[in-house]
Image (tube, helix red, strand yellow):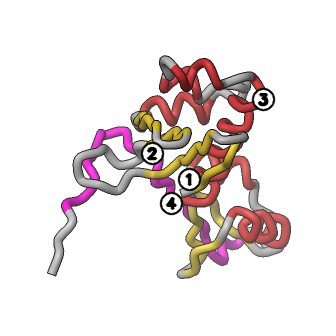
Amino acid sequence: MVSKKFGDLLVEVELEDSEMWREGTIRMRFNLGSAYEAYHVSPPDVEKFRNNHSSPAFITFIQPAGWIRDLLDDAIMMAIDALVWDLIEQKSTFNVWFSELSKAQIKEFAERYGFDLEDLMDSGSAHIRDADGQVIGGCEMQDPFYNPTNRLNPRHTYD
């Protein structure tokens, strides 16, 4: 979860993991004192947001009403976009050989081993080649926000 306060308004953004939501659903909660509202953005809308880099964009997918709409200005909406990007980057991991790496670490690997980070982000995988062009490894992106088949989150079992 990521969150930020704007005066008295607290905005929280989280990846849903409850079985009643589809994998990749983002929950955004607005808290102002004792008042709060929560909105959910579906995986297809999250994908649309990721493909549209103009800001502010994420608010268009939740269409807040009432007191929330009255509090939002362009600066807050752009900050909300940044919060959502922080969550996406925080939750997306990369597997290189058998290690999970952060985006900063994978950028370093991209420079060191000569693969295109943009190709990796677009296709979800890349090959690492040595100076002779031989594949010496691979990298795969695990994207928890990508859900083209509309899978539900798995059922939680409790012991």
Per the rendering, the mark at residue 142 is 4
**Dot 2 and dot 1 residues touching (CB under 8 Å):** yes
Question: SS of the residue at dot 2?
Answer: loop
**Separation of residues labelled 3 and 4 (CA atoms):** 31 Å
Q: Residue at x 72, y 41 (%)?
A: 7
Distance Cα–Cα, label 3 vs label 1: 32 Å
The residue that mark 3 highlights is: 75
Q: Nearer the viewer, mark 3 or mark 1?
A: 3
Q: Disc 4 or 1, which lies upstream in sequence? A: 1
- According to the picture, the residue beneath numbered tag 1 turns out to be 124
What secondary structure is the magenta-colored segment mainly? loop
Q: Is residue 102 left or right of residue 155?
A: right
- Mark positioned earlier in the residue sequence (3 or 1): 3
Residue 19 horizontal/vertical position (percent): 24, 53
Q: Give the secondary structure at mark 4.
A: strand
N-terminal of the two: label 2 or label 3? 3
Residue to which mark 2 is pinned: 146
Residue 57 position in % (x across, y down): 64, 25
